[in-house]
Image (tube, rainbow, N blue to C red):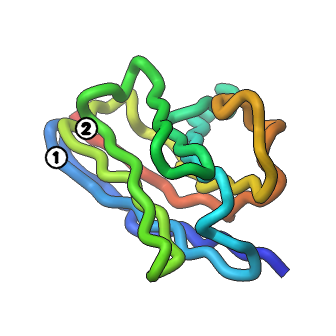
Amino acid sequence: QVQLVESGGGLVQAGGSLRLSCAASGLTFSRSAIAWFRQAPGKEREFVAGVRRNRITVYYADSVKGRFAISTDNAKVTAYLQMNSLKPEDTAVYYCAAAAVTIMRVTLPSEYNHWGQGTQVTVSS
């Protein structure tokens, strides 16, 4: 059974930093595409950052480029999202997602078949 468990969320002031973690089990992590999505109240889930199975090709939403960084540690079977220069508009529940097959559109939630339960990130102004 595949499990993705996010941690690291919390309350932070604008301009601060957080690092989210996504601990994976039950899948071949090193061969899985990994992504982070977020969902704010009343809004659709949106893509934040993703990395393909090759661990070379990385994608970011325009709204987080230059501030967020996705990384993976195959030895620890964990993915990370380093978030710097946080803004109030970054407030959302952040979800980790994984796909154990080759996917076409890294930015589409429907491409991923495994999801974590989410972790809340709140940025105060």
Residue type indicated by callout 2: Leu
Q: Is 108 drawn above or below residue 70 in the view shown?
A: above
Q: Is 113 drawn above or below residue 25 in the view shown?
A: above
Q: Residues within 10 Å of mark 1 (few under 14, many from 20)?
A: some
Task: Please tell me whether mark 1 sits on a helix, a strand or a loop.
Answer: loop
At 54% across and 41% down in the image, what residue appears?
50
At 58% across and 47% down in the image, what residue appears?
35
At 50% across and 35% down in the image, what residue appears?
48
Q: Quadrant of the C terminus?
A: top left
Q: Position of residue 54 (x, y in %)?
A: 56, 50
In the image as oriented, which residue stretches furthest toward the top?
Answer: 62
| Mark 1 or mark 2: whose residue is earlier in sequence | 1
Q: Position of residue 76 (x, y in %)?
A: 45, 81
Q: Which corner quadrant of the image does residue 116 belong to?
A: bottom right
Residue type indicated by callout 1: Gly
- Give the residue pinned by disc 1: 16
At 61% across and 35% down in the image, what residue appears?
41
- Give the residue pinned by disc 2: 86
Report the side of 98 relative to 73 (left or right): right
- Is 47 in front, or is 12? 47
- Is 6 in front, or is 71? 71
Report the side of 87 relative to 59 (left or right): left
